[in-house]
Image: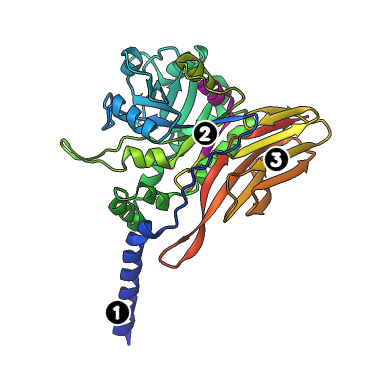
Amino acid sequence: MLNKLLKWGGAIVAAIAVLSILNPFLVYHVSRYESVEFGKYYEYSGVINIHTTYSDGSATYEEIGRSCDSLGIHFAIVTDLNTVKPMLDNLDRRWGMTLIIPAVEISGHNGEDRYLIIGDSLPLLPKDGISVDSVLSDASRKGSIVILSRASDSSMHGFVSANTKRNFRGIEIYNFDRSWKDMLSIFQINKIFGAFLSFSADPRSLNYILRYPAKRINEFDSLNETGRIVGIGGLGARSKINMGGNKYWLFPSYESMFNLVHTIIVTRTPYNALYRHDRELTLAAIRKGNLFVAFSGLEPARGFLFTARSGSTEAVMGDSLRLQGKVAIQILLPDSDDVETQILRDGRILGSYENAGRVDITVDMPGTYRVQVFQKRSMLPLFIKRLYPWILSNPIYVYK
């Protein structure tokens, strides 16, 4: 009897493993490319935190530019590690219709913390006699955008308490490189293996390893209780897993990552194809938090809009709004099939709405309001519908 149970148990485990590996081929994908009417707002999709051969990446600037342009990405912020050479070299700043913005990622002295510095001025680099705090303070003083990319738990605690002193602009509420590597455990390795086997045939298979970044979102909400913090989506894109010596795997591919996670800015002025104008428009939107993070591999998310109106004033995500009696909140989605929309105030769910392409509510309390949208996908091996993150907005700050 025991032998039979063990045999059947082994067969079930083996079947689950095989189906999980095949799952990325069978996941229900939606691709939608129809034009979207944005009204008086304009939306531009970008990718942030990309490494090239200037540091520890496997692609050149030219290859990154061509790839982004072929995928219809509006802007790419390239943040090579601990080097300002791309900012000094006379590189092409636009490939086709893609705006390329060179920036830098610096590493903390503990080797775990990472910070993005995005701006016009050349940042200092940490070295003997120049601390990381000095580098960040100098960058903030020069008007650059400083974003926490990765942090140890102790650093994140210090980040909250030292937020005002350091003039941080924001954090990566999602980092793809960190996210998928955190799944390298005995319970989730089959998902990574399945994605690895199938991503070259279908880059959208990386959707399978998407996970809601609960810990980072909680940190994001906590930070916004003490000051305004911008949340972006980062890639940490290297497409390079070192195997020892000069050997490495090119996984995940740049194209698959560029398809998966976008930071989409919302502006009131359109691009005009002039580099300086479009660059300043992009950086201004990031600095203010007029943006949302989208997992566009599930489905393109341009056309999402989250606004709030009180009196005659309308605010978009990242803006502040003075409470004049009541606030009318409106949410628009480009698609409403099998989605769940959540409105949060001060990090707590205020309301949840199923399959609604438009949500209108009225509130009369100050607070930090943001929106998150999930898509439902049936995943093997048990065909259970699970919620996958699709859209994570920046807050609208309503004050008395």
Other-residue count near label 3 (Cα within 10 Å), few / some / many at <14 / 14–19 / ≥20: some
Residue highlighted by disc 2: 264
- What residue range appears in magenta? 282-293
Q: Nearer the viewer, residue 127 or 16?
A: 16
Residue placed farthest to the front in the image?
Answer: 34
Can you tell which quarter of the image residue 23 is in?
bottom left
- Decide: is 212 above or below 306: below
Q: Amino acid at mark 3?
A: Gln
Residue 381 x %, y %: 40, 66
Residue highlighted by disc 3: 330
- Of helix, strand and loop, which one carries label 2? strand
Q: Are marks 2 and 3 in contact (CB under 8 Å)?
A: no
**Residue 7: image tag:** 1
Q: Are marks 1 and 3 in contact (CB under 8 Å)?
A: no
Does the rendering let one see residue 232?
A: no
3D distance between C-alphas at marks 1 and 2: 51 Å
Q: Amino acid at mark 1?
A: Lys
